[in-house]
Image (tube, helix red, strand yellow):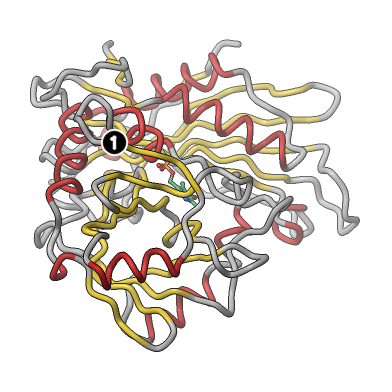
């Protein structure tokens, strides 16, 4: 399928000064859009000026949340070349999420072509400062106008792009997290392992409570026993415990993060033993008290690695590594961002160079 291109007027295409733009508020002048109808399949892929979209007030997504999304980044390398990080993994995960939500999957090659074409058209909007990037948000949602609860017969797929600044403007400082025992993020059999809107709407309440108490993120426990650690906010979680990096194994209610996978794959190369297994919150607390748990961090595309310095559990705060960013945390942050900006060797060929 040929992607139709309709460029925005020249005066709208000029990029502003992009010094540490706030997350997700500024958008490039173009977007990709494609439609789906049951009897036609996906059709009319198009890149056009960024604009609002019209929706039927009974569009299924607005009422029943049939929708999925991805988040990936484009980096301006130190060599002036444009790199995508693990783009095929993001495309595959988008299709896995779609499949779970009864949304028709997309042709992966076409999605890649759409990303590439959009990024090259708006390439002046990729911030150049180290740490900043162009964040891409592909998403699909159900547009059929009906209040009947059913699988939609119509969809829209869009890709929008937003220049984002370095996550750590004031240094790489550890966050404080709050273990919630009252709320859960995901349960076995639920859609916690895919990126679908409702998961995030459902997480806001616990997040608001944590923030009101002065914590940055929620630490989520498993739904059944409230005993096993699952994720932190919308990031995966790692602990450096007894000289080994451990992260909860993927049991079906944990989102299989691509940054998580990158840490696990790089660990042996960096000489750090790493393991996926079930981890109890009691074990974490005990590790902190005995000082065998030396570091903790979250992983996700937005911040790559987020150090954790404090955990609130059952009425008490537990401090990790004097609330300082640890060596292992820093090692993975430096290595992964090094690959993304073309400073370090890319042993797994995770980056894709984009060229006109
Ligand atoms: C997106 C996401 C992550 C991180 O995934 P990455 O692929 O590393 O960006 C982790 N947990 C949740 C719930 C997520 O939505």
> Where, by quadrant of the figure, is residue 102 drawn?
top right
Tag 1: Cα neighbours inside 10 Å, few (<14), some, or many (≥20)?
some
* Position of residue 78 measured from the top left corner of the image (x, y, whole percent): 8, 26
Quarter containing the N terminus? top right
> Where, by quadrant of the figure, is residue 218 drawn?
bottom left
* Position of residue 168 measured from the top left corner of the image (x, y, whole percent): 16, 56
Q: Secondary structure at mark 1?
A: loop
Q: Residue at x 31, y 65 (%)?
A: 287
Please give left or right for residue 20 compared with residue 227 in the image: left
Q: Nearer the viewer, residue 109 or 25?
A: 109
Q: Nearer the viewer, residue 190 or 84?
A: 190
Q: Residue at x 11, y 21 (%)?
A: 80
* Position of residue 267 measured from the top left corner of the image (x, y, whole percent): 27, 32
Residue corresponding to mark 1: 273
280 over 101 or under it: above or below: below
21 over 139 or under it: above or below: below
> Where, by quadrant of the figure, is residue 273 drawn?
top left
Marker count (numbered): 1
Q: Residue at x 10, y 62 (%)?
A: 170
Quarter containing the C terminus? top left
Q: Residue at x 81, y 51 (%)?
A: 145
Q: Nearer the viewer, residue 225 or 265?
A: 225
Please give left or right for residue 41 compared with residue 241 in the image: right
**Residue projecting furthest to the right:** 148
* Position of residue 71 measured from the top left corner of the image (x, y, whole percent): 43, 41
């Amino acid at each position: 399928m040929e992607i139709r291109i309709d460029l925005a007027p020249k005066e709208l295409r000029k990029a502003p000064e992009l010094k540490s733009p706030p997350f997700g508020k500024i958008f490039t002048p173009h977007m990709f859009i494609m439609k789906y109808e049951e009897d036609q399949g996906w059709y009319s892929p198009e890149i056009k000026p960024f604009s609002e979209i019209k929706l039927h007030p009974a569009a299924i997504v607005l009422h029943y949340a049939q929708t999925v999304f991805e988040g990936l980044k484009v980096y301006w390398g130190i060599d002036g070349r444009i790199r995508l990080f693990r783009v095929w993994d993001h495309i595959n995960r988008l299709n896995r999420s779609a499949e779970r939500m009864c949304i028709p999957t997309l042709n992966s090659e076409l999605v890649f072509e759409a990303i590439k074409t959009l990024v090259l058209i708006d390439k002046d909007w990729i911030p150049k400062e180290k740490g900043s990037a162009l964040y891409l948000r592909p998403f699909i949602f159900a547009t059929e106008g009906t209040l009947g609860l059913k699988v939609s017969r119509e969809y829209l797929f869009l890709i929008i792009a937003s220049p984002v600044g370095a996550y750590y403007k004031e240094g790489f400082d550890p966050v404080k997290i709050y273990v919630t025992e009252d709320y859960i993020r995901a349960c076995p059999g639920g859609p916690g392992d895919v990126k679908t809107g409702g998961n995030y709407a459902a997480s806001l309440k616990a997040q608001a409570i944590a923030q009101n108490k002065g914590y940055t993120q929620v630490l989520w426990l498993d739904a059944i026993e409230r005993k096993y650690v699952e994720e932190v906010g919308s990031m995966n979680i790692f602990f450096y415990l007894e000289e080994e990096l451990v992260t909860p194994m993927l049991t079906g209610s944990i989102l299989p993060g691509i940054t998580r996978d990158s840490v696990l794959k790089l660990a042996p190369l960096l000489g750090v033993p790493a393991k996926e297994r079930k981890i109890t919150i009691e074990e974490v607390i005990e590790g902190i008290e005995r000082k065998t748990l030396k570091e903790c961090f979250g992983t996700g595309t937005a911040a790559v690695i987020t150090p954790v310095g404090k955990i609130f559990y059952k009425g008490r705060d537990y401090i990790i590594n004097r609330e300082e960013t640890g060596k292992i945390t820093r090692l993975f942050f430096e290595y992964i961002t090094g690959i993304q900006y073309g400073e370090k060797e890319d042993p797994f060929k995770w980056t894709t160079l984009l060229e006109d």
